[in-house]
Amino acid sequence: MKAIIELENMSFRAFHGCYDLEKVVGNRFLVSVALEADADEAARGDDLSQSINYLTVYETVREQMEITSNIIENVAWRIGEALRAQFPQIGRATVKVSKLAPPLGGKVECASVTVTV
């Protein structure tokens, strides 16, 4: 049985961006992940050890958000790769990283990138 496990709109303060000021001042980011995984054993056995632990997912995302990158494409890719390495039952990870109020010279709610690894 395939399942899609989602953690949506995890909020972080981080220092990603191509402008020097972004690396000093930082910004707010939202991260959402959708993890397509084989959940047959976990579901039938009601066994967390066979499942994807949400806390571990959050901690993995938090660790990757602490590594400064110039572009959010890199952040999203690293998160997806780290989650797939942590949980071998993940077949596909879709990661969305949104930078809130990006410095674009006008009012923009967010700039987002979604990658699938």
Image (cartoon, rainbow, N blue to C red):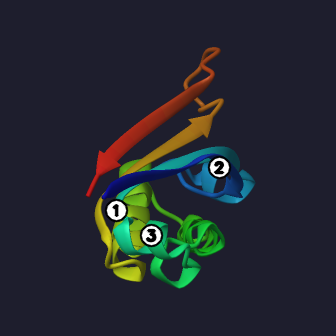
Secondary element under disc 3, as helix, strand or loop, is helix
Secondary element under disc 1, as helix, strand or loop, is strand
Q: Which residue is mark 2?
A: 21
In the rendered view, tell whether residue 32 sits above or below residue 111. Answer: below
Circle count: 3
In the rendered view, tell whether residue 20 sits above or below residue 51. Answer: above
Q: Is residue 92 left or right of residue 82?
A: left
The answer to which image quadrant residue 54 occupies is: bottom right
Q: Is residue 14 left or right of residue 86?
A: right
Amino acid type, mark 3: Arg
Q: Which residue is mark 1?
A: 37
What is the spatial separation of the Cα atoms under label 3 and label 2, in whole angstroms?
51 Å
Secondary element under disc 2, as helix, strand or loop, is helix
Q: Return the x and y of residue 85 as percentages of the image width and height.
A: 35, 80
Q: Which residue is mark 3?
A: 44
Amino acid type, mark 1: Ala
* Residues at circles 2 and 1 in contact by the CB criterion of under 8 Å: no
Badge nearest the viewer, 2 or 1 = 1
- Looking at marks 3 and 2 on the same chain, the residue that comes earlier in the sequence is marked by 2
Furthest toward the front, the residue is: 44
| Residue at image point 47% right, 62% down | 69
